[in-house]
Amino acid sequence: MNITALRRFPFQAMGSFCEIQLLDKSRIDARQRFRLLAAEVVRLEQKFSRYRSDSLVAGINASAGRDSGIEIDEETASLFRHASSCYEQSNGLFDITSGVLRKIWDFKSGTVPTRSQIAELLPLVGMEKLELRENQLFMPAGFEIDFGGIVKEYAADTAAALARNLGIESGLINLGGDFSVIGPLPGDRPWPVGIVNPSKTENLMARLQLQRGGLASSGDYERFFMHEGKRYSHIINPMTGWPSDGLRAVSVCAELCTVAGSAATIAMLKTENDAVEWLAQLGLPHVFMRQDETIGGTALTTDNPESRTSKQPDSSQ
């Protein structure tokens, strides 16, 4: 007799540990569906990766300075329009052209660039200098775009939508800590999702309940280095060229993981006080950690865990 059970399928994609959880009677059927969902994630990774010479992003960046620009498909144009909206709403803090600054910020060697090196690259940052006419994109010479701050969240949403089209009613997509709900657990119960404490990764900062939509997190703990007693985060402010030094971490819930991820990134780029105020005005459920390691946000509950231990099915970021 087939019994409906939670099927977990871990895999690696986008440089992260990923997992898809599906509620299904048949593990064989669930695995076949998982393969389709994972293939969609891989497709988006290959298409938008800045590390692949054969990716669409590599082709776009190679077109910089070309009078004719480059034609992009509707999926890419849609991502570009979302990035442009975030750029405007954040007053320039969310900027997909800022990836060029990584050329001088080496987080493997822990090298701090000089002010003159930063000043030399800043003229190559600024999304307002790009132009999209219908699906024709024009970029000045030397400019590059990087969808790294969008594509993982977009992939989670896309995989969840595909799962629903395949008839899956209950499931959860986890791409490196960015989540998208396929459908709630039986009885319309939410998925419990653990948010790791950036200061003590064996503990949870909070546990959130996801019934629908998505959740995305950002933090300075993901990649950083210490230099002369100062912490340098991988999250670079595109207006100054220097790493952000606001909140330690932030997680946001929204109807789409793509929206949640953009909001989390914008919050991380703001000063600590501005970020807290902005998140409150935004009105989306969220949780954050300040530099002094105090935790706040509207998504906190009385179930504020002291350890990472939780009942299944729990997904931890």
Image: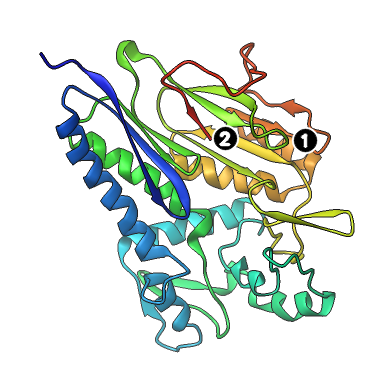
Q: Position of residue 255 (x, y in %)?
A: 44, 34
At a point 75% along the width and 58% down the height, the residue shown is 243
In-front residue for pair 9/142 = 9
Please rate how many residues cluster around mark 2, counting C-alpha atoms within 10 Å: few if below 14, some from 14 to 19, many from 20.
Answer: many
Residue beneath disc 2: 252
| Mark 1: amino acid | Arg
Residue 37 rendering spot, x and y as whole percentages = 27, 44
Q: Is residue 13 visible?
A: yes
Q: Is residue 296 above or below residue 116?
A: above
Q: Disc 2 versus disc 1: distance between alpha carbons?
A: 15 Å
Quarter of the rendering containing residue 252: top right
Q: Earlier in the sequence, mark 2 or mark 1?
A: 2
Give the answer, above or below, for where 309 lies relative to 50: above
Residue 142 is left or right of residue 53, and the answer is right
Depth check, mark 2 against mark 1: the one in front is 1
Give the quadrant of residue 55.
bottom left
Percent from the top left, x then y, of residue 251? 60, 35
The residue beneath circle 1 is 290
Q: Amino acid at mark 2?
A: Val
* Rendering colour mode: rainbow
Question: Is 11 located above or below residue 97 in the figure?
Answer: above
SS class of the residue under badge 2? strand
Q: Nearer the viewer, residue 93 or 54?
A: 54
Expressed as whole percent of the image width and height from the top left, the position of residue 297 reads: 68, 26
The N terminus: image quadrant? top left
